[in-house]
Every structure is written in structure tokens, then in C-alpha cells.
């Protein structure tokens, strides 16, 4: 049996690994949304799509519930991400 300090270190290493996955996943997501923003700007489409955003929030709330994650937290997180994406899309549209 390992000591509490050993267990804590093992758990922290696992958390660090998950954090790395989150950062790399967010980077990949933003690369994709960058391409979406460029496509929208090129074709004069609005930076924001409220219908899509509402659908995504509802979908991610359901996923959070299925994963036993607080859906309110998930909504706050995705709302922050969506706001950042819209900001990027507005910046891209302004540069066109």
C-alpha cells in the first residue's frame, strides 16, 4: 500500500495529464473555429449564430449530465468559449 503522499502525487500527475489534454483540445477547437471565422468573413456571414450557440449549450448540458458533471458549470464554460470564438470571428470580419 502506498503512502498518502505517494497517492497524492499520483493523483496530481493524472490531473496534470488531463490538464494537458484540455489545453491541446482547446487549441484544436480554436484552430477549427478560426477556419469557421475565415469562411464566415469571406462570405459575409455574421460572426455569431445564436441558434447554433443555443443548440450547442443544450447539447453540452446533456453531455455534462451524462458525465456526472455539473451542467451549470459546463454551460458557464462553453458560454465563455463561445464568447471568445465570437470575438475572434468579429476580429477576422473586421480585417476582411
Image (cartoon, rainbow, N blue to C red):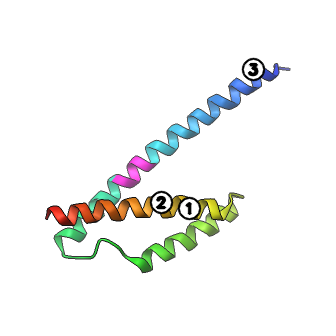
Whether residue 69 sits left or right of residue 23 in the image: it is right
Residue position marked by numbered label 2 in the rendering: 80
Residue position marked by numbered label 1 in the rendering: 76
Residue position marked by numbered label 3 in the rendering: 6
20 in the magenta segment: no
Span shown in magenta? 26-30
The foreground one among 75 and 3 is 75
Q: CA distance from mark 2 to mark 3?
A: 36 Å
| Residue 76 image offset from top left, x and y in percent | 56, 62
Whether residue 8 sits left or right of residue 72 in the image: it is right
Q: Quadrant of the C terminus?
A: bottom left
Badge 1 crowding class, 10 Å Cα cut-off, few under 14, some 14 to 19, many 20 or more, is few
User: Residue 8's image quarter?
Assistant: top right
User: Residue 46's image quarter?
Assistant: bottom left
Q: Provide the secondary structure element on which disc 3 rests.
A: helix
Q: Are marks 2 and 1 in contact (CB under 8 Å)?
A: yes
29 in the magenta segment: yes
Q: CA distance from mark 2 to mark 1?
A: 6 Å
Whether residue 68 sits left or right of residue 80 in the image: it is right
Q: Provide the secondary structure element on which disc 2 rests.
A: helix
User: Residue 90's image quarter?
Assistant: bottom left
Which mark is first along the chain, 1 or 3? 3
Judge depth for marks 3 and 1 and give the one in front: 1
| Residue 36 image offset from top left, x and y in percent | 29, 64
Name the residue: 45% across, 73% down.
Answer: 53
| Residue 80 image offset from top left, x and y in percent | 47, 60
Amino acid at each position: 500500500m502506498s503512502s498518502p503522499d505517494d497517492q497524492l502525487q499520483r493523483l496530481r500527475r493524472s490531473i496534470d495529464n488531463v490538464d494537458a489534454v484540455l489545453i491541446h483540445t482547446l487549441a484544436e477547437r480554436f484552430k477549427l473555429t478560426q477556419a469557421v471565422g475565415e469562411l464566415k468573413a469571406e462570405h459575409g456571414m455574421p460572426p455569431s449564430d445564436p441558434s447554433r450557440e443555443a443548440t450547442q449549450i443544450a447539447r453540452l448540458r446533456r453531455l455534462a449530465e451524462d458525465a456526472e458533471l455539473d451542467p451549470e458549470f459546463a454551460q458557464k464554460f462553453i458560454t465563455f468559449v463561445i464568447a471568445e470564438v465570437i470575438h475572434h470571428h468579429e476580429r477576422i470580419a473586421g480585417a476582411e
